[in-house]
Image (cartoon, rainbow, N blue to C red):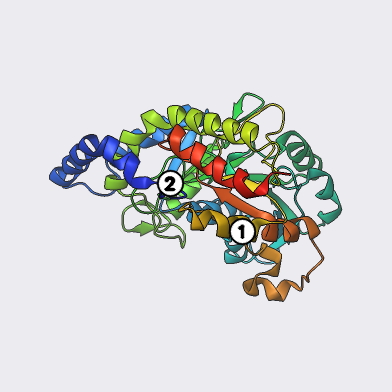
Amino acid sequence: MQIPLIDLTAQYSMLEEKILAAVKKVLRSGQYINGPEVRKLEEKIKEITGSKYAVPVANGTDGLVLALDAFGIGQGDEVITSPYTFFATGEAIARVGAVPIFVDVKEDTFNISPELIEEKITKKTKAIIPVHLFGQPAEMDAIIELGRKHQLIIIEDACQALGASYKGNPVGSLGDIGCFSFFPTKNLGCYGDGGIVVTDNQQVAERIRMLAAHGSKVKYFNEMVGYNSRLDEIQAAILNVKISHLFEWNEKRRLLASKYDRELKNTNVTCPKAIEGVKHVYHLYVITSKYVNEIKHHLEQKGISTGVYYPSPLHLQRAFLNLAYKTGDLPVSEKLASHTLALPLFPELDNRQQSYIIDCLKQVWIK
């Protein structure tokens, strides 16, 4: 049996007729940028996140860059974030000229440790970017409290967590602004790059909309130096077909995760922990074990694909050598980088496939 880490073709096969019809409609319209499909997607994302404003952008990374820029964060400012995340989080901070300040994460949730944040706050600190990693909301109450206490902007990196919630409130609506990605492998993915930014701040939303269109409100009249970061009509049309299935797909992910939790309880792996009061959407199901290399090899021999997220924490990336972090500075993130493995989990994974994965793990790794 061959089982991929994620099977995008299975989802496409289910929706092929509707997706092709939606794409053909756009192609026949002749309107490929900032058309009705983009506006429709904005409304749907506002509804899901409970936000007043939604601004589509070219990708999730641009969303983070534009959010930072819109709040005037730049040269010499400091932004606190997690080192255990995709590179884009730290990259966006550096791209606007600010300095990423990395705070270690919790081993059981993979998210930033709020109790370690305050000691890193200085006069230069302007924002905190909590990452809702793998679909699990960060501990936002404590982070928001720190933001209020020190007058810091809270930018949610929710690129992996659309549809997740924290104490009944959708991610993206918890801080000052939220950023989402529509990369193909995300819980709601398009067939290229895409992203969206949400906020309740009208001034910030308008500034992001301008920045994303070359700093222009009116075509050919540019009020500031901006970017070219727009979600095209074709991708928006695809997302509008898929978005009605988002909560169904997220629920299927939770059911698959709960089966892994139950069945892997007595093996040499530790399952991801969902903190109390959150609705985790399991963008990835990541286990931890000191035997990850052996497990990975064993599963590959059985035709099961896995993934390593992420093999190097950001503070040890070559791109951030100038920040002078060294091995041992953030021990939990460093340990996770060499002890984690993502198992196949996607809504179309059937019971027979998942049982096979679990059986293969149990063949060798029972305690």
Quarter of the picture holding the C terminus: top right
The quadrant holding residue 199 is top right
Q: Earlier in the sequence, mark 2 or mark 1?
A: 2
Q: Which residue is mark 1?
A: 310
> Dot 2: what SS?
loop
Residue drawn where x is 80% and y is 60% of the image: 331
Vertical comparison of 221 with 48: above or below: below
Residue at 27% from the left image edge and 36% from the top image edge: 15
The residue beneath circle 2 is 182
> What amino acid does circle 1 point to?
Tyr
Q: Is residue 348 visible?
A: yes
* 38 left or right of 186 in image: left
Local packing at callout 1 (Cα closer than 10 Å; few below 14, some 14-19, many 20+) is: many
**Distance Cα–Cα, label 2 vs label 1:** 19 Å
Q: Nearer the viewer, residue 70 or 137?
A: 137
| Disc 2 residue type (three-letter) | Phe
Residue 44, position as x, y percentages in the image: 40, 30
Residue 207 vs residue 181, the one in the foreground:
181
SS type, badge 1: loop
User: Looking at this rendering, what residue extends furthest in the right direction?
Assistant: 119
